């Protein structure tokens, strides 16, 4: 399914229509869509994660115009993006969610200060459709962040997502299973995230221009059995 989120209402568009190149480009280019690339000069290399310990671990924050991989054995890690999504809500740009396993829980997001009217939601796409959509929205220059959930990407596809993120000046966040840690990746940053009691355990697997191997634990994220907004 292809959705555009506006506050608490999700508007559905035919999947076949939405996945035509001209249809998606029309949505990205129409007057109501934000030309983020024209307004956003990527002067700073990173966007603060909103967590001092995590900023220190990853080299200052989420790398702009680059690919981040968050690996876990379940659906974990989304809460780490919440402070960044609050910051990005101030930008005149989409925040894209592609094939998220659960619907964003609008009241929760709004309570955190996230502008849900800027969420571009694409769900229940086949693997090839989801990858195509992710690459297109990353390149478009109209998104401040693209979050993509997938467990079936090859090395070449990962490389293409990194290139698209750099071209669009967009933060790309790829959620993958823990088994993907065995696969080589050109991502600028790779994190392994797992839930431990009421905390998230975060291990640094890869960091551009820095050492891997550090780890931290973050609590107070409202975590229960899984790190998700709504089932």
Image (tube, grey):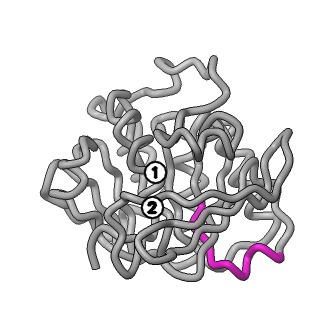
Residue 175 lies, in percent from the top left, at 57, 67
**Residue depicted at 49% across the width and 44% down the height:** 145
**Residue depicted at 13% across the width and 58% down the height:** 9
Q: Residues within 10 Å of mark 1 (few under 14, many from 20)?
A: some
Q: Secondary structure at mark 2?
A: helix
Q: Residue 83 in magenta? A: no
**Residue depicted at 59% across the width and 68% down the height:** 193
Mark 2 touches mark 1? (CB < 8 Å): yes
Judging depth in this view, the residue of 75 and 220 nearest the camera is 220
Q: Judge from the rendering whether residue 28 lies leftward or rightward of residue 71; answer left or right.
A: left
Q: Judge from the rendering whether residue 70 lies leftward or rightward of residue 158; answer left or right.
A: left
Residue 49 lies, in percent from the top left, at 51, 41
Judging depth in this view, the residue of 111 and 202 nearest the camera is 202
Q: Label for residue 78?
A: 2
Q: Which residue is denoted by mark 1 in the rendering?
A: 81
Judging depth in this view, the residue of 189 and 56 nearest the camera is 56
- The C terminus sits in image quarter: bottom left
Residue 186 lies, in percent from the top left, at 82, 55
Q: Label for residue 141?
A: none
Q: Residue 175 in magenta? A: yes
Q: Judge from the rendering whether residue 224 lies leftward or rightward of residue 53; answer left or right.
A: left
- The N terminus sits in image quarter: bottom left
Q: Secondary structure at mark 1?
A: helix
Q: Judge from the rendering whether residue 3 lies leftward or rightward of residue 52; answer left or right.
A: left
- Tell me which segment is drawn in magenta: 174-182
């Amino acid at each position: 399914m292809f959705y555009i989120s506006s506050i608490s209402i999700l508007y559905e568009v035919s999947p076949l229509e939405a996945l035509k190149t001209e249809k998606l480009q029309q949505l990205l280019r129409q007057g109501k869509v934000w030309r983020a690339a024209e307004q956003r000069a990527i002067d700073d290399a990173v966007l603060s994660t909103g967590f001092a310990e995590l900023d220190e671990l990853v080299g200052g924050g989420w790398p702009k115009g680059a690919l981040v991989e968050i690996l876990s054995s379940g659906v974990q890690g989304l809460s780490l993006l919440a402070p960044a999504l609050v910051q990005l809500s101030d930008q005149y740009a989409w925040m894209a969610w592609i094939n998220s396993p659960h619907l964003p829980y609008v009241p929760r997001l709004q309570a955190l200060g996230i502008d849900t009217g800027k969420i571009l939601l694409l769900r229940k796409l086949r693997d090839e459709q989801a990858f195509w959509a992710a690459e297109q929205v990353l390149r478009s220059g109209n998104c401040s962040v693209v979050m993509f959930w997938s467990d079936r990407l090859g090395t070449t596809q990962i490389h293409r997502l990194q290139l698209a993120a750099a071209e669009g000046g967009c933060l790309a966040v790829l959620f993958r299973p823990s088994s993907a840690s065995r696969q080589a990746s050109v991502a600028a940053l790779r994190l392994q995230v797992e839930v431990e009691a009421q905390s998230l355990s975060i291990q640094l697997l890869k960091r551009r221009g820095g050492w891997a191997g550090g780890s931290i634990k973050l609590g107070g994220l409202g975590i229960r059995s899984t790190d998700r907004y709504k089932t």
